[in-house]
Amino acid sequence: MILPKPGVAVRGSKTGQPVMALLDLLGRSWAMGIIWHLNEGPSTFRRLQQYCESISPTTLNKRLKELVHAHLIVRTKDGYSLSEYGKQLFELLEPMGFWARHTWASCFNEESETNTVCNEKN
Amino acid sequence: MILPKPGVAVRGSKTGQPVMALLDLLGRSWAMGIIWHLNEGPSTFRRLQQYCESISPTTLNKRLKELVHAHLIVRTKDGYSLSEYGKQLFELLEPMGFWARHTWASCFNEESETNTVCNEKN
DNA sequence: TAGTATTGCTACATAAAATGTAGCAATCAT
DNA sequence: ATGATTGCTACATTTTATGTAGCAATACTA
């Protein structure tokens, strides 16, 4: 199990550039989904499992360990919750929600099965 | 091959909430790395392959198709490049670079092999 | 306090995704 | 016309993720 962090070889950077370590970590299934959910408050293992709909306990456990190791989440008496770092990261992720809903989604509306090109200027 | 987009079932949302579709798409290996690189300008397939250090052509090709399908990148005479949507998304990703370097990385500095807890207040 | 429920996992088999290497057809430069 | 470069595809192997079962530990209930 490779735990991406600044300074160690990660996907995209053998020297472990911090941003590449972060993208490697977040570019694993469910990593961002977990952070997104935990922003709503601490959550137990089972609740996270339900929220994520189809995550396996194996993967959830692995991802949680990675995120704890990366200092983005912590274990508390209430289960798992975002650390200060995790909260900061969520702040950076959050705008993607608005953008996805209000900008990105719109370019799929007038899309036909035959793959109409969307209007890039919108 | 599932191509995540708003409105279709994706990881984290059977109803295809836009933000979950986006997180599913970006939460695949190299997706954000490719976008990050393309912000520096259009790039050929081979150049992307070199940049990404260890990406296989199979995966690169798959990821490129997904990103084109998602309207985030386009093919031009210079190879692949960010679409207007892709550029907007990069703007949202960019702050992660600064944060990773200046905030996140610092909590690994005083970390020992025995896993010293980092100072969450920093 | 004995029984029941819930939680946080682990084990393990199977399926899906990513890697690594080879190589080929199409275009480009000479 | 020849050689180099590009954009892939094929395919075998390895790594990741899924799905299901179940178990030990704690918390809750009668």
Image (cartoon, coloured by chain):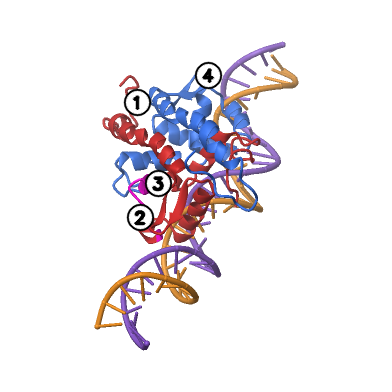
Chain colours: A red, B blue, C purple, D orange
Residue range corresponding to the magenta coloring: A34-45
Residue position marked by numbered label 1 in the rendering:
A117
Frontmost of labels 2 and 4 is: 2
Q: How far across and how far down the image is residue B71, in percent?
A: 39, 29
> Are tags 2 and 4 found on a single chain?
no
Residue at 29% x, 31% y is: A111
Using the numbered discs, state the Cα–Cα distance from disc 3 to disc 1 in whole angstroms: 29 Å
Where residue A118 appears, as percent x and y from the top left, is 33, 26
Relative height, residue A71 to residue B89 (above, below): below
Which label is found at residue B78?
4
Q: Which residue is mark 3?
A: A33
Of the numbered discs 2 and 1, the one sitting upstream in the chain is 2
Left or right of C17? Residue A118 is left
Q: Nearer the viewer, mark 2 or mark 3?
A: 3
Q: Which residue is mark 2?
A: A53
Chain ID, mark 2: A
Q: Are marks 2 and 3 on the same chain?
A: yes
Q: Secondary structure at mark 1?
A: loop
Q: From what the image shows, is residue B34 above or below residue A4?
A: above
CA separation, marks 4 and 3? Answer: 34 Å
Secondary element at tag 3? helix
